[in-house]
Structures are given as C-alpha cells and as structure tokens.
Image (tube, helix red, strand yellow):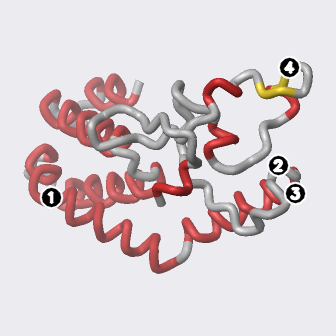
Amino acid sequence: MFRHIVRTRDYLTEHECHALTKWVGNQLSLGKPLLIVERTLKKLLQLLDCDMSLDLANIIDTQSMGMLSHEVDIAASSGIFREKETKEKEKIKKQGNRHPQDDDVVIALHVPNDSSCWYWSNSLNCPNKQKVNGVCKYANKHVCGMPLSSGGYCTEKHRAADHV
C-alpha cells in the first residue's frame, strides 16, 4: 500500500522504493526493534526532504547504518528497553507463572520456536491452557531451544538461561 501511494504520487522512484523496502525488511528480519527502524527511517526521509536531488538508495547505502547505530545508542541511554523489560517481568510475576525459587528469571529465549517449549525453556511454569490432564502437551519439547550459530536449535535438556 505504501509503495503504491508513493509511486502513484511520484514521491520516490521505483529504485528508491525497492531500496527502502529492502532495507526495512532486512533490519526487521535481523531482529532490530521496530521503534529503532522507524526512527532511522524517518531520519533518512528527512534527509531526502532537505534535498530532493539526492537519491534515497544512495542515502540508505551510505548513512543508514550510522543512523541506525545512533538510534540504538539513544534508546539504550534513555532506558526505553529497560522499562519494557521491567514491565514484562512485573507482568510475569503477577501472572504467577514463575518457579518459587527463581525470583530473578531472565527471559533468555525471546522468540518461541518449534523445537522447544518456550515456557519451560525460560524457567516458567507451563500455563494451564497448554496442559492436558495436568501435563504440558509439549513435555517432549522440554529442551533448551536456543538458536545456534550453525542455524539449528540447542536440544539439550538444560534451560535457555544457561546459554546467557
């Protein structure tokens, strides 16, 4: 939809649209937070607004990574992600999905995968909606599940926090 509107109104060339969508897609697939990607994208477009004779694809190639790292630094120093992490911990604590001996559970496996039970891997109690006759229906997947550099997932019987 964005690309169609931008091309219809001739704000960006086809080459610029392609470079922009490719860059955004790459950043999101690499796990960059949406807030950071959005802020960087706005700054890239502001540069283009200042001088329409520039090519957005060239701006992306030359300046995007510097701007992205600058936005990451700003977010880290402002504590945006620390506040979010604290809110997540408080939410988990309120839900009662924690083991009593683990007061400072750190979510090590942020993204669920098909090779492990996300709750077990993060040292959380499996929720009742996931249980059949009181047993987790993914008990056979009570393994670590951390992504490995080789591209697979760790299938050892330890928790994901052991990798952190």
Residue 97's disc is 2
Query: Taking 11 as reference, is 35 left or right?
Result: right
Sooner in the amino-acid sequence: mark 4 or mark 2: 2
Query: Taking 105 as reference, is 163 left or right?
Result: left
Residue kind at label 1, given as amino acid type: Asp
Q: Look at the picture and state if 128 lies above or below 137.
A: below
* In front: label 1 or label 3: 3
Q: Secondary structure at mark 4?
A: strand
* In front: label 3 or label 2: 2
Residue kind at label 4, given as amino acid type: Val
Q: Secondary structure at mark 1?
A: loop
Residue at 32% in and 28% down: 3
Q: Quadrant of the N terminus?
A: top left
Q: Mark 1 — residue?
A: 51
Question: Are the residues flagged by discs 1 and 3 in contact, CB closer than 8 Å?
Answer: no
* In front: label 4 or label 3: 4
Work out how far the residue at label 4 is from the one at label 3, CA to CA, in angstroms: 23 Å
Sooner in the amino-acid sequence: mark 4 or mark 3: 3
Work out how far the residue at label 3 is from the one at label 2, CA to CA, in angstroms: 8 Å
Sooner in the amino-acid sequence: mark 1 or mark 3: 1
Foreground pick, 54 / 77: 77
Among the 4 quarters of the image, the one containing residue 151: top left
Q: Mark 3 — residue?
A: 94
Q: Secondary structure at mark 2?
A: loop
